[in-house]
Image (cartoon, rainbow, N blue to C red):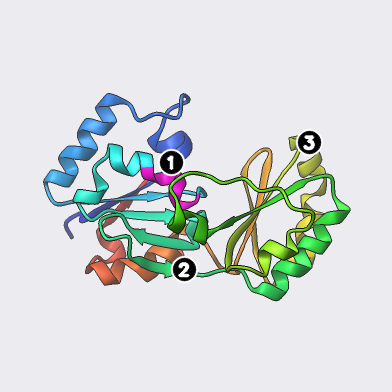
Amino acid sequence: MAIKAIAMDIDGTLTNDQKVISPRTREKLLAAQESGIKLILASGRPVWGLHALAQELDLQNHDGLLVAFNGAHVVDAQTDEVLFDQAMPADELHRLIDHLRNFDVIPMISLVKYERDACDLKIREVESLHEVADAYPVDKLLTAGDPAYLQAHYEEMYTPFRQTLSGMFTADWYFEYTAPGIDKARALEGALPKLGIDASEVVSF
């Protein structure tokens, strides 16, 4: 089959150590789009964290896709239509927030509403994440901590939730939680048929 889409991770794949796209890579990807191939940016970042790169690659004029939160949220870059979204189960999110109080980590949540209301990151420190978790659906909870500490304790942090949430390292200092079964491949399975693209027609990096 002909290739109809290219899916790319961002940090360390599409971008270099300076977090930028090299001129040669940009040139080749723009040419691919001109030939009819769709580009898909897939990342643990929220949607707002993908907008600048999407604009640099002109995804909004070529009907590209943005796969955010490690696959929990997929958006059409041209229309802003949400093609796939799976928030964390509210009861498990609240149980996780209580559990993480036992560990020396900083828990953070990203809300889809913030990307819809504005393009910039908003940071709000709260006494308890419960009050925010009750306000809107949450696609991801991220814990930040010392890499050595996370390596020593992530099993304790994750074991009570292995059957109800997905958990993974996305950097040495980040351990993240999403809804069960969430990953980038599953997100594409849900979104690609709406674009008339089969998984066999996608190249991924």
Give the mark, 3 or 2, whose residue is nearer the N terminus.
2
Q: Name the residue under label 2.
A: 85
Residue placed furthest toward the right = 102
Estimate the spatial distance between the alpha carbons at disc 1 and disc 2, rounded to whole Å.
20 Å
Question: Residue 89 location, x and y as percent?
Answer: 64, 73
The N terminus, quarter of image: bottom left
Quadrant of the drawing holding the C terminus: top left
Q: What label does residue 188 carry, if any?
A: none
Image coordinates for residue 171, horizontal then vertical, percent: 62, 40
Answer above or below: position of 152 versus 191: above
Residue 150 falls within the magenta-colored stretch: no
Q: What residue type is labelled 1?
A: Ile
Q: Residue at x 44, y 48 (%)?
A: 48
Task: Between residue 193 and residue 106, name the one nearer to us.
Answer: 106
* Point 25% across, 50% down: residue: 60
The number of discs equals 3
